[in-house]
Image (cartoon, grey):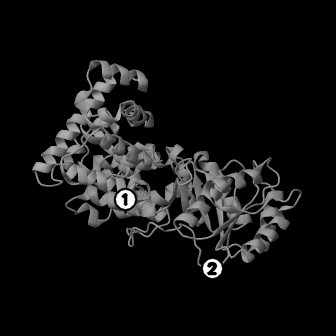
Amino acid sequence: MFDTLTDKLGSVLNKLTRRGALTPSDIAAAMREVRVALLEADVALPVVKDFIAKVSVQAEGEAVVKSVTPGQMVIKIVHDALVEMLGGDPTNPEGAINFDAPGIDLAAPAPVAVLMVGLQGSGKTTTTAKIAHRLQVKGKKRVLMVSLDTYRPAAQEQLAILGKQVGVVTLPIVAGQKPLDIAKRGLADARTGVFDVVIFDTAGRLTIDEAMMAEVASVREIVKPHETLLVTDAMIGQDAVITAQSFNEKVGITGIVLTRVDGDARGGAALSMRAVTGRPIKLMGVGEKVDALEVFHPTRIAGRILGMGDVVGLVEKAVANVDHEKAEKLAARMQEGKFDLNDMLSQLQQIQRMGDMKGILGLIPGIGNALKQVKDSQLDPKTFKRLEAIIQSMTPKERRLPDLIKASRKQRIATGSGTSVAEVNKLLKQHQQMETMMKRMKKMGGLGALAGMMGGGGGGLGGMMGGGMNMPRPGGPPLGRR
């Protein structure tokens, strides 16, 4: 998400940081380019006008003009304005790590009713299951899911199947029952079953119509939800903003959940919705997996847009997806200077669990420019799968003792993994470089050489991707170069 906007804003702001002093005309020219970038990213025109006016006034102020680093001051002003646009408070950034944050407000007597609304095809039913799973796993809540969609074929069955997949209870289906009667039964079952949260998945339509809105309003009167969440597809751009406005005016929503965020390179919907509706974006769907749901943090999203990364988000991904026991064993072996192909396989699998590689690297501060140098094909999940297939085509002995792998064995491994001997050779070379690094670490008495794994020479992560990439540190030279 925000790929296009990040590139364009980065280009504009980089020009400013390269200047020793800024004139009003420099700032005006930059703001014109920022305006175009926001409009091309599908941000609503009124939102763009307010944003540019606010940034321009501050950027032309005396504090910037007389600053030692005026370019950096402008970047800070743009960052703070983005945070505000997204619904955050730039003077009080949410930096604390809360791995169990539900993302929605549950401060009400149990069972807390959550009403899911939105158009058909927005991902409402899948998002209902994702939220239920999140509340149950991270929030330790007992959740009941209720499908009120009696119009779309097999909609109730879909939620029941998703419930089984994520281990969340769904209200039993009674054929022929009307949505309002189902809502009453769901509320009663949630109370008698001592559930903490009950989530109602309402029916959608292809377009907004009076019948749908009337039904949602009637359901709302019955269940009296503490949260009414609008689920909308980020990829439909300005239409998503119009949908949000309509639902907020006719039904009244407390928050927004953006879906398919990972497929939207522009990001205009996210930037516009909070400003247009006055309602916060609470969660965003970042993939198809059941746990691919993130809390929307304005400060951290603004950092991603400006290429500043999101270290907290990176840590959260690691904590949620990395097998800590395996990671500790691997760390202990690395400290001893040991690193065989089983260890390399484990490392590959841990990386893949964290999700899309490009998205992960985008969370690292200062990595934006380096990412542009790496071809998309080298960040493709298939690249990791091929490497994994090569190692899994080896015998247990070959994984422990890679020196055994000579010409005939390489041919067998290549055939078994559906790759080429050249690819097998490349992987073995990468392993050799990483093993050398581990031994060097042991001689240095610890993790002093770990930086080299992330940097040059084709070893480590950069080597795995085939990019030989040196990933820069904020405020320092690229890792691996001293």
- The answer to whether any part of residue 173 appears in the image is yes
Q: Residue furthest front?
A: 397
The picture quadrant where one finds residue 446 is bottom left
* Residue at the image position 71 percent from the left and 54 percent from the top: 159
N-term-proximal mark, 2 vs 1: 2
Q: Residue furthest left?
A: 443
In the rendered image, which residue does mark 1 sit on?
315
Closer to us: 101 or 16: 101
Q: CA distance from mark 2 to mark 1?
A: 30 Å
Q: Amino acid at mark 2?
A: Ala
Percent across and percent down for residue 29 are 36, 48
Q: Residues within 10 Å of mark 1 (few under 14, many from 20)?
A: some
Dot 2 falls on a residue whose secondary structure is: loop
Q: Is residue 154 above or below residue 169?
A: above
Residue name at image x 48 percent, y 47 percent: 1
- The residue nearer to you, when weighing 303 against 120, is 120
Front position in the image: 425 or 292: 425
Can you give x and y, in whole percent of width and height, for residue 262 in the image? 51, 46
Task: Give the residue type that dot 1 points to.
Answer: Val
- Residue displayed at 65% across by 51% down: 123
Which residue in the structure is indicated by mark 2?
108
- For label 2, the crowd category at 10 Å Cα-Cα, with few meaning under 14, some 14 to 19 and many 20 or more, is few
The answer to whether the residues at label 2 and label 1 have Cβ atoms under 8 Å apart is: no
Residue at the outermost right position: 176
Q: Position of residue 153 (x, y in %)?
A: 80, 47
Left or right of 35? Residue 20 is left
